[in-house]
Amino acid sequence: MSLDRLLRGISRPVAAVLDRALADRELTVDDADLLLQAQGADLLALMTAADVARRADKGDLVTYVVCRNMNFTNVCYVGCTYCGFARHKDDVDAYDHPMQVLVEKGRDAVARGATEFCIQGGIHPGKDHRHYHEILLALKAAFPDVHIHAFSPEEIDHGHKQSGMTLEDYLRWLRDAGLGTIPGTAAEILDDEIRGVIEARKLKTARWVEIIEAAHRVGLRSTATVMYGHIEQTRHVAAHLGLIRDLQKRTGGFTEFVPLGFIHEKNRLYNHLGARPGSSAPEDVRLVSVSRLFLRPQIPNIQMSWVKMGTKLAQVALLAGANDFGGTLMEESISRESGSEHGENLPSEEMRRLIREMGRTPAERNTKYEILRVFEDPALDPPSLEPKRDARLSGPARWSKPVVRARAGRAADPVAETR
Ligand code: SF4
């Protein structure tokens, strides 16, 4: 089959939208809805167009940030139906870390090269605005150079309501205590009908927008996210993208857009409320591609989530419009406790390997997407800062015996030792 015939397999409406995107014309919400349903040849064309756009927008570097997730409490009474993380305060595995534990985690993270702490927790009914402020003061005092990326709009809402301040004053108060940027989580789908089912007691769309706009106004930039693969339809995702793009036109405060697939295994939304079992691989890739084409040029950084997708599909997303591999995380519990099995720590050296396997060049960035270091030559990579690997991962003990003895300064004869 000739290339020409292959191209003729693409449907006319999809070809027309992709042509417009590659001519740098803005796509409509209806265009996004159409592309979010692309299959077969249409999907391959969509991925290719997004890859071309990614190269034009961001070149061949793939960035990542060395960061540590810190979930300071898992006590939360909001009751989102997709959440496997929240606990009642009397549950045996409920926790509420004191500052000392957070500082210890920070110390470990800095020793492993972290430039960012990403801090989020449950909405603890016994905590108020002062608790968020204390976390910032404690960590900033111990690690003045580390960027603090913290508190979802739901947490901002919770603290603000108890603070007695205006929203902007409250955000300035947090900023002055060390808050650097905020995660654009708690967005899920910015449609109140969907939110009424998946998170009836969480903040509504207008409040999410109000908080993000206020944050951007006081100089706190944020990320933007979407959670898909549950009860929403493509039109909801398309409208969500439209809302995010409009907001970015007003403020310019988003640093990146991150599609987050729903993790379905351990929550009520899938097990009792009839949600789909998370997103499919084509759905994951489609959303990365559509995000690239729809949000350009307003949001040039499209991140894929290796925690949700797994690292192999995340590599494929690099061919479909993504330019960022996200954070190393070091620990992750929100996705894991909903059933994700894709790990909780992806060290820098693993990031670089995965990126290079796709023929691209890795680069470490900070939270605001300033490039800290480009890793052109693998031979010049720095040594790993990770703790030594668990001995149980080295295979049967008899194979490692000679190494152990050699390290102890005794003559080691590998053949004799393994006989
Ligand atoms: S998603 Fe967040 S706000 Fe909702 S129940 Fe879980 S921890 Fe609480």
Image (cartoon, helix red, strand yellow):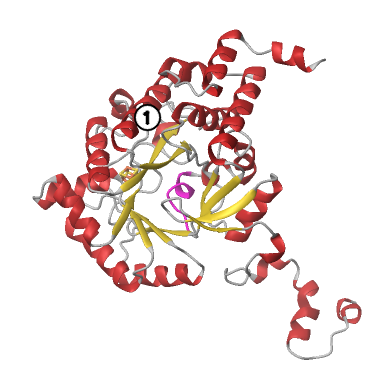
Task: Tell me which residue sits at (8%, 50%) in the image.
Answer: 164
Report if residue 5 is visible in the image: yes
Instruction: Find residue 104 and report its horizontal and vertical position in percent.
Output: 39, 72
Q: Magenta residues: mostly which secondary structure?
A: loop
Label count reads 1
The residue nearer to you, when weighing 77 against 351, is 351
* Image coords of residue 194 (percent x, y): 33, 25
| Image: magenta residue range | 331-338
Question: Which residue does the image show at 31% across and 46% down from the upper left?
Answer: 152
Residue 272 sits in quarter: top left
Task: Give the residue pinned by disc 1.
Answer: 245
332 inside magenta stretch: yes
- Locate the N terminus and report the quarter of the image it occupies: top right
Front-lying residue, 397 or 352: 352
Q: Is residue 277 above or below residue 14?
A: below
Q: Is residue 77 visible?
A: no
Between 239 and 394, the residue placed more toward the observer is: 239
Q: Is residue 109 above or below residue 263?
A: below
Q: Is residue 170 left or right of residue 81?
A: left
